[in-house]
């Protein structure tokens, strides 16, 4: 009855089913790993944002690489803004996906070291991208700033090419090593996204809190892949039973149409 399973068509179908099952199980495991990774990352971000601010030099120093545990941690710094060496970061978007600049201003600490402060987003209102945009001034004199500690930007991590030959005072990436060479100063590793004090007026537009990664979607994908894996053998059995019924009907029909042999006298 099941000799048809040895046919070329059914052998190929069975092999494909046997390959699909472990593949789908592995894809489900991969999605679950992504779910756990994203969940842990979301928790890390939430813990960092909820932690009390600490002086910036407790977490970073010149040449320091900001770690994942330090990222987004709120820090404070006391000093003054140096607008003479202020630059803008090109091709940055705001919450409405409008293209403009991020304003990067050196912040000179009381001990002479420099902290890079991303003061927020401004629109690209200038008719030419080669012209340095008009930037609202930060508070004058000594001030205390608060912000989220961020790691240096790199092409590998961000996908942004660090173009050369840019107009004066314009950069593509926020990188403390590059800024240390430009400023000829001791620059703390990483930078901060300023959260306080808030600017007078609407600009620069402070950067919003990082959003949670959609970990639940990966969980749903994992369940989906495992359901597909379970459906493959069920579907194979259904196909086999249907093929068996059809072949049985064909055989019964053939038997009914076969003329009976005449009886011998």
Image (cartoon, rainbow, N blue to C red):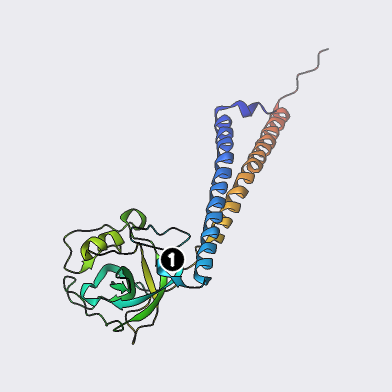
Number of marks: 1
Q: Residue at x 59, y 35 (%)?
A: 18
260 or 87: nearer the eye? 87
Rendered location of residue 264, percent (x, y): 81, 13
111 or 12: nearer the eye? 111
Rendered location of residue 195, percent (x, y): 41, 77
Rendered location of residue 80, percent (x, y): 30, 78
Q: Residue at x 61, y 48 (%)?
A: 226
Q: Residue at x 46, y 67 (%)?
A: 73
Which residue extends farthest bottom?
A: 201
Q: Image height check: is 40 above or below 206?
A: above
Quadrant the N terminus occupies: top right
Secondary structure beneath label 1:
helix
Which residue extends farthest top?
A: 265
Snapshot quadrant of residue 187: bottom left
Quadrant the C terminus occupies: top right
Rendered location of residue 31, percent (x, y): 54, 51
Question: Mark 1 — residue?
Answer: 58
Task: Please give left or right for residue 25 compared with residue 97 in the image.
Answer: right
Asked if residue 99 can be seen in this view, the reply is no
Q: Residue at x 50, y 67 (%)?
A: 48
Task: Please give left or right for residue 76 compared with residue 171 in the image.
Answer: right
Snapshot quadrant of residue 193: bottom left
Q: Image height check: is 80 above or below 245?
A: below
């Amino acid at each position: 009855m099941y000799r048809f399973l040895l046919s070329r068509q059914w052998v190929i179908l069975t092999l494909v089913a046997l390959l699909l099952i472990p593949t789908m199980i592995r894809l489900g495991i991969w999605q679950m790993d992504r779910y756990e990774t994203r969940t842990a990352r979301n928790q890390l971000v939430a813990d960092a944002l909820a932690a009390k601010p600490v002086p910036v030099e407790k977490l970073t120093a010149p040449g320091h690489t900001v770690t994942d545990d330090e990222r987004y941690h709120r820090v404070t710094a006391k000093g003054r803004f140096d607008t003479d060496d202020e630059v803008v970061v090109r091709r940055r978007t705001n919450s409405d996906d409008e293209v403009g600049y991020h304003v990067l201003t050196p912040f000179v600490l009381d001990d002479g070291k420099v902290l890079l402060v991303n003061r927020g987003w401004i629109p690209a209102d200038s008719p030419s991208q080669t012209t340095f945009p008009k930037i609202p001034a930060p508070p004058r004199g000594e001030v205390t700033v608060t912000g989220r500690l961020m790691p240096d930007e790199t092409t590998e991590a961000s996908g942004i090419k660090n173009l050369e030959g840019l107009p004066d005072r314009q950069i593509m990436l926020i990188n403390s090593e590059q800024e240390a060479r430009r400023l000829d100063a001791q620059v703390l590793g990483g930078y901060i996204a300023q959260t306080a004090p808030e600017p007078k007026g609407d600009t620069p537009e402070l950067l919003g809190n990082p959003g949670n990664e959609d970990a639940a979607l990966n969980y749903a994908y994992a369940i989906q892949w495992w359901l597909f894996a379970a459906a493959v053998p069920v579907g194979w059995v259904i196909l086999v039973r249907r093929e068996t019924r059809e072949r049985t009907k064909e055989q019964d029909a053939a038997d009914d149409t076969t003329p009976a042999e005449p009886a011998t006298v």
